[in-house]
Image (cartoon, rainbow, N blue to C red):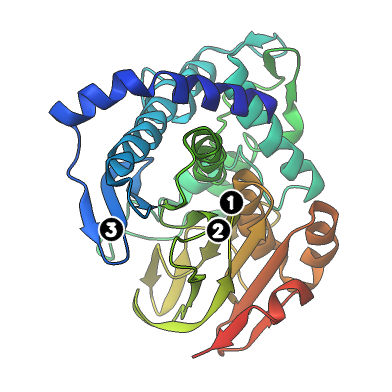
Amino acid sequence: MRRKLAAAVCMAAVCILLIALYRRFGRDVQELPEHAFTARVFVLDTSVSVTVYDDDRGNLAGEVSECVLNAFRELEKDVISRYEPSSELAALNSGYKPKEAYPVSATLSDAISETLDVCRMTQGALDFTIAPLADCWGIEDATSADFAPPAREEIDAALSHVGYEHVKTGDGTITIDRPDMTIDLSASGKGYALDIAKGILDEMKPSACVVDCGSSTLFYGRKPDGSAFKIGLRNPEGGREDMLGYFTFAEGPVFCSTSGDYEKRITFEGKTYHHIMDRSTGAPVSGDLASVTVFAPTGILSDALSTACFVLGREKSMDILAAYGCEACFVEHDGTISMTDGLKDRFTKE
């Protein structure tokens, strides 16, 4: 975490240079009601928006948003994407040798170490080496016309290359003791990016800001007009704007992330499959849960734990949430909503 904050301080320090680029090449900043300004761009494999609230410093909105979005671009391109050929993670996955320490930057080391801690704590409910199994199922890229569940022997072959237990972190190094494994930070990378964004906001000090990475969001500061942040709880069986209710926070920082079976799913012979894998079965998670939303003290925890808790289920998640000082809301397919005690007074049902 200290390394993330140091990186954020450096990013804020060079923002004066980025502002000039922003004014010439940057995205448009749209003024919204109540002195709010927003900028949007596609990065981190999703649509990201940065909304800045400020009474009379409208120029700050462009500076803040461009600093945050540039940090995200650099993080994706240079560090954490397993798909970007220029990224450190892609180089690690393709270039490591089993049982030999592979040198990595402080940023990648932090992202892997913090995600690995959640893998260990949840005993593999979150496993950042799950990519071979996810690729075996191919749900994220499949269409109804070409999808079919893989055979058991294909699943077992994929599982032979899965196991966070085979990854070790050292002083600026990563060691993987099996060949042909892949580290994938897609279940924690957006949250890690939000931690970097918070460091930038701490330096630039806007009154309030919302950094929305789709499934993971940071609510920062206090709005100038005194109104609270309202964080919607989506109805998993409805559309994007269909809410079951909302949580209210007077001020941030508040990090929250949601994992659910409604975003990426496909039906085959009457049965629906989704993208969240359970390594204990080698198949998509099955059960009563439709979504889990986690509120955490850091972005990476909210992101990683939302996936882990979806795999574990509500009862098995409670001790882990308490250990990390997190709160969570669970929505079942029948519409039942349950949540940890720390959220109950903040929730208003629609």
Q: Are marks 1 and 2 in contact (CB under 8 Å)?
A: yes
Query: In the rendering, at what x and y percent does residue 130 appear?
Result: 58, 42
Label 1 residue SS: helix
Residues at marks 2 and 3 touching, judged by CB atoms closer than 8 Å = no
Circle 1 residue: 303
Which residue, given by chain and number where applicable, does mark 3 sit on?
146
Task: Read off the residue under disc 2.
Answer: 257
Instruction: Decide which of tag 3 and tag 1 comes sooner along the chain.
Output: 3
Residue 127: name its quadrant: top right
| The label number, if any, that marks residue 199 in the structure image | none
Q: Residue at x 72, y 20 (%)?
A: 177
Secondary structure at numbered mark 3: loop
Residue at x-position 76% and y-position 16%: 170
From the viewer's side, name the closer residue of 302 and 259.
302
Q: Position of residue 139 (x, y in %)?
A: 40, 56
Residue drawn at x 40%, y 62% is 264
Which amino acid type is marked by label 2? Answer: Ser
Judge from the rendering whether residue 159 lies leftward or rightward of residue 232; answer left or right. Answer: right
Q: Hey, what amino acid is under mark 3? A: Asp
In this view, 193 is above or below 100: below
User: Seen in the image, is 196 located left or right of residue 295?
Assistant: left
